[in-house]
Amino acid sequence: MLTLAELQAAVRDTVLGGDATSLSGVVADDRLGHARRLQVYRNNTTILLGEALGANFPVVQALVGEVFFSALAKRFVRLHPPRSPCLFEYGADFAAFIADDPQAATLPYLADVARLDWAVAEVVHAADTQVLDTGALGAIGPSDYGRIAFTPHPALRLIDSDFPIHAIWALHQPGADLDAGVNLDLGGEAVMVTRPGREVLLTVLPSGGVEFTRHLSTGAELGDAFATAQHADETFNPAQILGTLLGLGAFAGFTLTEAFPP
Amino acid sequence: MDHKIPTARDFDAPIPARAGIGLKAQHYQDIKDRLPDHIGWLEVHSENYFGSGGQALAWLDALRQDFSVSLHGVGLSLGSAGPLDAHHLARLKNLASRIEPGQVSEHLSWSTAQGDYLNDLIPLPYTSEALDTFCQHVDHMQDALDRRVLIENPSAYMRYEHSTMPETEFLLAVATRTGCGILLDVNNVFVSAHNLGLDAKAYINTIPGHLVGEIHLGGHFDADVGGEILKIDDHGSKVRPEVWDLYEHTIARFGPKPTLIEWDSDVPDLDVLVSEAARADAVLDLYTMEVSHAHTG
């Protein structure tokens, strides 16, 4: 007789696509046969986890269609079943899987769209932390601006791509005109995802803005982030992009780092 | 093993012995705006509200102002070999502290093996080994939440040759050993009885009414599997007439119990759920008269 752990391991293997022979004589045949009965559980797991992925990656699903998506999801589910029972957290490695999947490779931008879908899914459930009140910055003198280090808001994500992922994303939102299409020659887009109020916002960052924002979001001082971004792009306008970041809820707070002795 | 006796705190702000519905995101605004009759309380799948923040939690907080809420877990996998998922239990405790639910429930089943969550409520073999494991996990859950929980009978498409007792005997042993209550899913009894060749009424007649803290009703469909009909529990349609009959038999036997209308796939307009809830309320009303003073006094 199988122990409970052995039985559950065998059912797990069968449900994730293995054959049912190890459960012959364990799962009762009862007219239908054990394999057909186990097939019900295999279908439930495959289909329902595929639907959960579709809910977390709606633009990927819209791009490839339901038939392609369910086949893609089935391959993913069987190799990477969820490690958590919270399905809104399922799919952290789906974008990487897409990047390596030979059939998905026909759409080179699909993995980056998946990263954007995932960023939105994470931001939807991020903590309701207050966004930084910009009034608090008024007390800081201009000579100390360079020492400001922002605390990123828990709902801040940055996705950088060689493809126009924001345009692709926008084309697959409710009410969009699908016939408008997207010119893939437009070049890459860097998208910031935030949630300053109830709604999730997607914002395309200008050239230089993504390096600047990435530095700030990892706790760099404003002075250092500015120097790095300006090095990357001389036309970069730090005051404008900083205003955008503050207005869209990228930060939850700030600290002033230690001043060097004169 | 300790024999636990429920304390008064276990029944703080209980869900009422009326019809309730499963809360779905597409109905948040409609329920808040209309507060329809026949929605006596709400139930949610706990795991959908394990996020750190966002709109789902904000809605649940808002609706909790108007309704008693039952937290119905689908992911703790009480029947899995090995220790319970402490992180998952901590998140449930956190949600329970926030929502102050009228009831907390989980399933007589397992969903996780070797750390992989299979997203289904898979039946256990009814053996003494599984009973020991399951009771330890219910004890752990009740200790962590500091409250009595309800355990729901599963819908089943298979059984195991090495089971040594019927499901009802296993479920009643869990209730006796842990002090937990029972969430009796009447549709699941009907579905399992058909699929496994059991007697649905005999199943219900075996359950002592005082252990039942809540009842579930939902839809199922018939699947043709190799020429045989398997009844598949998908919560995707109206409650079937045969299940309404079994529900009335259940309420006639137990008296009024909080009754949930579950609808989780192809979710219709709120009005359809309200009309199903009204039908459950009509059955509850038939059997409420003689005990009404105990509930309204």
Image (cartoon, rainbow, N blue to C red):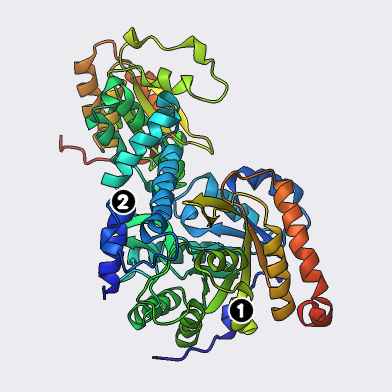
Tell me, for residue B60, which label it has, or none: none
- Quadrant containing the C terminus of chain B in the rendered view: bottom right
Q: Mark 2 = which residue?
A: A16
- Parent chain of label 2: A
**Helix, strand or loop for disc 1:** helix
| In front of the other: B225 or B202 | B225
- Quadrant containing the N terminus of chain B in the rendered view: bottom left
**Helix, strand or loop for disc 2:** loop
Asked if one can make out residue A132 in the rendered structure from this viewpoint, the answer is no
Q: Mark 1 = which residue?
A: B202
**Which residue is drawn at the image coordinates 54% and 48% (left, top)?**
B56
- Residue A97, above or below B47: above
> What x and y, as percent, mark residue A99?
25, 30
Q: Seen in the image, is B250 located left or right of residue B92?
A: right
Q: Residues within 10 Å of mark 1 (few under 14, many from 20)?
A: few
For the residues labelled 1 and 2, the Cα–Cα distance comes to 35 Å
**Which residue is drawn at the image coordinates 68% and 57% (left, top)?**
B240
